[in-house]
Amino acid sequence: MTRSPPNDVFTARIIAIDGPAAAGKGTLARRLAATLGLPYLDTGLLYRAVGRRVLDAGGDPADPATATSAAAALTEADLRRADLRGPHADAAAAKVAAIPGVRAALLGFQRGFGATGAVLDGRDIGTVVFPDAAVKLFVTASLDARAHRRWLELQAKGSEVGLEAVTKDMRARDAMDQARAAAPLHQAADAHLLDTTGLDPDQAFAAALAIARAGLPPG
Ligand code: C5P
């Protein structure tokens, strides 16, 4: 992709939001970005788009050479595809995301995107992509709460997948994201923990906004 990393990565207006799937990161990140006037990048889409490219070509998302070439060839148009979500895409994304070459190929784009300030959400934004981000949030919720939320989303789209299957897939994806050697999912030491298990979206947003306002430079 065309955006390249600046020489001096500007982190004073970076909000890094990490956490496991369906913890509410995306909703929070989007609202924070709109409220604070910052661009927003859902970095999960990058890994989803790489997985999709590999699947389209009939390849194995777990194969390092294939997945790394797909990451190097990624375009911004790939991120706008309508078929980046769903159980198949979830699994492919988690597989390509474990490959160091894929992560390296996507790093420059993410840093370039944040060059003048941004909200980014993912798994390694506060630990690897922007370790000096002004604001770091680690957003989580219990496995049951996250699986239930994802199941409701799928139901609303007409899917008949059961809650048990959603819980099982989510547990497997959590395990892959946490256990991989390359940029595993974990809370940065200086990240604020936000557990959304018992919070509605407005309560979670209010808590996140207070943390973000306290951490960003004035103006
Ligand atoms: O956030 P989302 O569920 O869309 O991410 C899809 C997959 O991409 C995750 O399961 C994870 O394996 C990977 N990912 C990652 N690092 C990021 C964002 C996503 O490894 N910064």
Image (cartoon, rainbow, N blue to C red):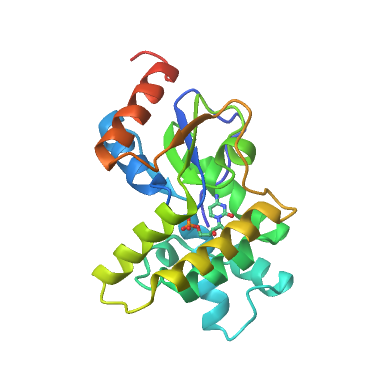
Q: Horizontal and vertical percent for residue 21? A: 48, 54
Q: Horizontal and vertical percent for residue 106? A: 59, 54
Q: Relative to residue 176, is residue 65 drawn left or right?
A: right
Q: Quadrant of residue 166?
A: bottom left
Residue drawn at 52 percent across, 68 percent down: 169
Question: From the image, which quarter does the C terminus lie in?
Answer: top left
Residue 145 vertical placement versus 96 (above, below) = above
Q: Which residue lies furthest to the top in this view?
A: 218
Q: Nearer the viewer, residue 198 or 85?
A: 198
Q: Nearer the viewer, residue 146 or 14?
A: 146
Q: Which of 203 and 121 is in front in this view?
A: 203
Q: Relative to residue 114, is residue 198 drawn left or right?
A: left
Tally of marks:
0
Q: Horizontal and vertical percent for residue 36? A: 30, 29
Residue 37 vertical placement versus 80 (above, below) = above
Q: Nearer the viewer, residue 16 or 72?
A: 16
Q: Horizontal and vertical percent for residue 96? A: 62, 66
Residue drawn at 45 percent across, 45 percent down: 141
Q: Relative to residue 39, is residue 34 drawn left or right?
A: left
Q: Residue furthest bottom?
A: 58
Residue drawn at 41 percent across, 45 percent down: 25
Residue 215 vertical placement versus 32 (above, below) = above
Residue drawn at 65 percent across, 80 percent down: 60
